[in-house]
Image: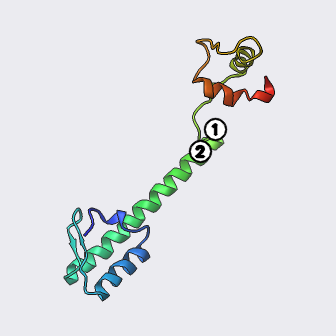
Amino acid sequence: MVWKLDGLGRNVKDLIHFVCELGRRGIGFVSLTESIDTAAASGRFFFHVMASLAQLERELMIERTQAGLAAAREQGRVGARKRLMTASKMAAARKLLGPGHVGERGRSQPGSVPTLYSWVPASAR
C-alpha cells in the first residue's frame, strides 16, 4: 500500500515490474490517492493508465525545466541567483580583512564573516 503512485517508481517499466513481482508473490497493490487496487482486472488496467500518466507528467516537467534553462541561457543568465559581491564590495572586503582590521566588518558587506572569508581567501589578503 502506498499513498501515491508517483512516489513508487520513476517510469512505467519499473512500476509494472514492481507490481508484477508483488502479484507473483500473491501480494496485491493498493494506492490510496488514486484508489487503485490491482486485485481486480479493472484495477490493473487503471494502474497502467495512471503509471503512464505519471511518467508523462514527469517527462513534461523535465522538458519545461530544460526549455526554461535554455531560454535563460540565451538571455545571458545562469541558473543561480544574482551574486551579492560586486567588484567594489570585494575591494572593501579585502581592505577590511587586511592587516590591522581584524574583526571589523562594515554594514555594507553582505553575508557573514565566513562568507567574506570564502570570497577573499587568506592568500589574497
Secondary structure, mark 2, is helix
- Who's the residue at 46% across and 62% down the image? 59
Q: Amino acid at mark 2?
A: Ala
Can you give x and y, in whole percent of width and height, for residue 46 in the image? 26, 74
For label 1, the SS is loop
Report the quarter where the N terminus lies: bottom left
Compared with residue 70, is residue 120 higher up or lower down, i.e. above or below? above
User: 18 left or right of 79?
Assistant: left
Residue 84 in the image: state x and y as whole percent.
61, 25
**Disc 2 packing (10 Å; few <14; some 14–19; many ≥20):** few
Query: In the image, residue 52 lies at what x, y percent?
Result: 37, 71
Residue 107 located left or right of residue 76: left
The residue at the point 74 percent across, 14 percent down is 95
Contact between marks 1 and 2 (CB within 8 A): the answer is yes
Q: Residue drawn at (36%, 63%), measured in percent from left and top? A: 7
The residue depicted at 51 percent of the width and 51 percent of the height is 65
Vertical comparison of 8 with 73: above or below: below
Q: Is residue 17 left or right of residue 103?
A: left
Classify residue 98 by image quadrant: top right
Q: Which mark is residue 75?
A: 1
- Residue 115 image point, x, y percent: 62, 28
Tag 2 residue: 71
Which sits in the foreground, 50 or 103? 103
Q: Is residue 92 left or right of residue 81?
A: right
